[in-house]
Image (tube, rainbow, N blue to C red):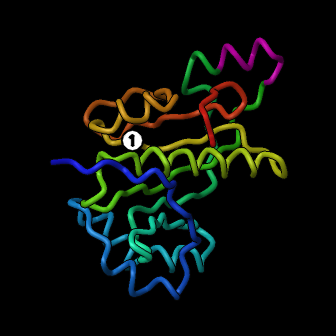
Amino acid sequence: MAEIIPSTKPVFEKLSKQHLQVINSFQNQEKELVDFLVEDALANQAMRISTTYLAFLTEGGFKKLVGYVSLLSDSIRVKENKELLVFFDNKGIHYSCLPALKIGRLAVDALYQKKGIGTHLILFSISTGSKLSDNVGCRFITTDAKPEAIDFYNKLGFRVLKERKGKLIPMYFDLSYDRIQLD
């Protein structure tokens, strides 16, 4: 029987060396997502390639790692999507690329899947992109979605940037026009 997600939202913390023990307890059916968190996430942060945020729920006074998201800089090549190309051309904006924040990795602990944690990770990413855009240019949130995750991203307002068969599908969320509840 599936548990109901706790009414409290996850608390997000930037990954640090103090989290080394807790990340070793993270479980996911995709080994590459666990391996990234345990073996590569801190090194990527040190090299300023991506920043990983951990999502925690408090249960009975104990913090439980329930998911993570890694964010990095990106851009969208506008010409890859006719809808975007026409939209920006009509606005007199003729840049070939526009700035974005990319969701590089996103994973939910196996015990917490299908309970809303992935949605919280996306909302955190969108909120982070919105705050970033107050200080530097950031128009979009992007990701390369696995085919089985397309519906999940679509429900949250993401659109396909470029169709690809059987591979990762580039998707985007427009911070200026797409609206979902962030709180």
Which percent across, then down, holds residue 133? 77, 46
Q: Is residue 87 above or below residue 12?
A: above
Question: Which region of the structure is painted magenta?
Answer: 85-93
Q: Residue at x 59, y 16 (%)?
A: 83
Residue lying furthest front: 60
Q: Secondary structure at mark 1?
A: strand
Q: Is residue 65 left or right of residue 51?
A: left
Category of crowding for the residue at label 1, using alpha-carbon neighbours closer than 10 angstroms: few (below 14), some (14–19), many (at least 20): many
Q: Residue at x 29, y 52 (%)?
A: 113
Which percent across, then down, holds residue 181? 61, 34
Q: Residue at x 59, y 80 (%)?
A: 46
Q: Is residue 144 above or below residue 180?
A: below
Q: Is residue 54 magenta?
A: no
Q: Is residue 89 magenta?
A: yes
Q: In this orientation, which residue lies closer to the viewer: 3 or 171?
A: 3
Q: In this orientation, which residue lies closer to the viewer: 91 or 57?
A: 57
Count of residue discs: 1
Q: Quadrant of residue 144?
A: top left
Which percent across, then down, holds residue 82? 57, 17
Q: Quadrant of residue 26?
A: bottom left
Amino acid carrying label 1: it is Ala
Q: Is residue 50 left or right of residue 114?
A: right
Q: Is residue 108 left or right of residue 177?
A: left
Q: Which residue is mark 1?
A: 145
Question: What is the magenta segment's predominant secondary structure?
Answer: helix
Q: Residue at x 64, y 31 (%)?
A: 174
The C terminus appears in which quarter of the rendering? top right
